[in-house]
Amino acid sequence: MLGIEDPWVGLAYLLCIISALLCLVWGVFKWNTDDPQQE
Amino acid sequence: MSIWMIIIVVAYLCAIGYLGFRGFKSTKNATDYLLGGREAHPYVMAMSYGATFISTSAIIGFGGASAIFGMSLLWLPFLNIFLGIFIAFWLFGSRTRRMGLRLDAHTFPELLGRRFQSRFIQGAAGLIIFLFVPMYASAVLTGAAKYLAYQFGMEYNTALFVFSVIIALYVVMGGIKGVMYTDALQATIMLIGLSFLLVMTYQKLGGVTTAHQALTDMAELVPAKLQAAGHQGWTRMPKFGTPLWWTAVSTIIMGVGIGVLAQPQLAVRYMTVKSGKELNRAIPIGGVFILLTAGVAYIVGSLSNVFFQQTVGKISIAVAGGDVEQIIPMYLQAATPSWFSVLFMLTLMSAAMSTLSSQFHVMGTSIGRDLVEESIGKGKRVGGTLATRIGVMAGILASVYLSFVIEEKFGKTGTSIVARGTAIFFGLCACAFLPMYVAGLWNRRVTKAGAISGLLGGACSSLLWMIFVQEKASTALLLCNRFFGTRSLAIQLVDGKEIFVHSGPIIWAFVDPILIGLPISILATVLVSKFTEKLPEEHLDLCMGKSQPRTQQH
């Protein structure tokens, strides 16, 4: 996968990108969401 | 050094000075000094969190380590993004912010102390931070001073003094606002510098897949000594149960990956924003920042092997003469254009300054606020933020003294002690604070005695493991050798040859303290809580948000 021999290492490479994308998507969808529990 | 480099460095220092001054001008009271008035912008908060987390040792040290371990270390940036940003901001962040507001807590130890109604917890946590952050700060400070001395042709001691004074000025005067404003600028520089480095590296090596394939094809070039320790190639995990596997998985990946959740200088950032909305907005900024800093350092470190193999026919560690810390600087010198070295110099200065400023600030708050005012002084205030400012100065002096003495008196032995500073502090924080912190946020059944037992059990067991068992730390700390005549109790001498004690796949000398101290801390917290008196219901209601918060009293 992507020239990486060990699937576990390839998975780590992909998970780095996927988790950063998850953060981005979360930011887009939750941009104006405040704490459900409300100073 | 070129005139351009001087102009850029002066402009950078002017920008830092301006931001520090802005922090100073807008700091009016203790809440401003300790928490930025609880109204930090999400970009400033996220970048400050990331820049505090990613120091020069993450770029130079861990980047160099990945040239040895290879891309298997990418599990760490994944944990940093998923646990250290996403889970931390989403789950820990919002609860910490709300509880901090309800209990009027201004520091991480104060939050823990007030949650469990214990000045002892606040004082002990403050003391642990004040005693061990200087070691972590010295690791960063020594590296930065050496780099500056080399770049500007200065004496090491002069570089150490100048660098410390610059940071001291904006931390003492500007408080957390000065720290966070400058962090945001420094993080932006780091983001630009490391993004350029990633693009240049992949471009130079023929693209993503081509570069990775070239690294995969180098597996037979792994030195015999590393192969014997479990190395199977730079795009493969080390062999399960080997010393290399235990070091990569238990110390680098788990030790730092889990340890990040209970770092006091990071946890306090959640309390600097005004609402949960800001935390949600900080998640994408933090996630991308960690990917493009820590992730890039590890990828480039691994791929430096391909570059050196193609250009000089050697792997990175051979080119660097066995010095891991020299790999990234040598790669930059050989593989990047000269204009980039100026940008990268600013990147490394930013990485060091942003981490150090937060370390100095957390040292000051732990000794001034947590230990002197709250724990010993029973809540008596000493002239607004005076005690904290004096604490910051004491912390800076302790770190500078440690960096000076270690270089002057212990030479290479001292450097190896300091190099363990980051790992020791991360492990200690996880073992001492994490069970209590998680219980404080989510569990009503954990008692004051349970929390204290977990704190003491975790701190003592992880420290004892570092001093007497974990080979890397016990060798550096020298105490095991002094008491028992061996560098680790998990090493036996058979016919003059060192044999590592193991149980099945577990090689005890390579097991990280977090795998020992954290279970002990959790067990102590749970067991003692079962047999001791629960905290009052009305206090738990207040902590968990079911009754009115206490009045402001800072």
Image: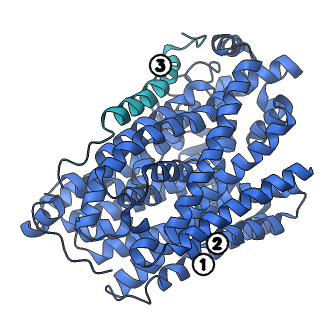
**Which of the image's four quarters has the C terminus of chain B?**
bottom left
Residue B297: image quadrant is top right
Identity of the amino acid at label 3?
Leu
Q: Chain of mark 3?
A: A
Which of the labelled discs sits on residue B153, or is there none?
none
Which of the labelled discs sits on residue B393, or is there none?
1
Q: Whole-Å distance between the Cαs marked 1 and 3? A: 45 Å
**1 and 3 marks on the same chain:** no
Which residue is found at the position 31% from the left and 70% from the top? Answer: B105
Q: Specify which label sits upstream in the sequence, 2 or 1.
A: 2
Q: Chain of mark 1?
A: B
Q: Which mark's residue is nearer the viewer, 2 or 1?
A: 2
Decide which of B187, B366 is in the foreground and name it: B187
Counting from the top left corner in percent of width and height, residue B268 is at 40, 60
Which residue is found at the position 66% from the left and 49% from the top? Answer: B56
Q: Whole-Å distance between the Cαs marked 3 and 2? A: 43 Å
Counting from the top left corner in percent of width and height, residue B528 is at 19, 61
- Judge the density around disc 1: few (<14), some (14-19), many (≥20) Cα neighbours within 10 Å: many
**Is residue B467 depicted above or below B76 in this figure?**
below
Identity of the amino acid at label 2?
Ala
In the displayed structure image, the side of residue B187 where residue B97 appears, left or right: left
In the displayed structure image, the side of residue B155 where residue B434 appears, left or right: left
- Judge the density around disc 3: few (<14), some (14-19), many (≥20) Cα neighbours within 10 Å: some
Decide which of B486, B394 is in the foreground and name it: B394
Q: Which residue is mark 3?
A: A11
Chain represented in cyan = A
Q: Is residue B52 visible?
A: yes
**Element carrying mark 3:** helix
Chain represented in blue = B
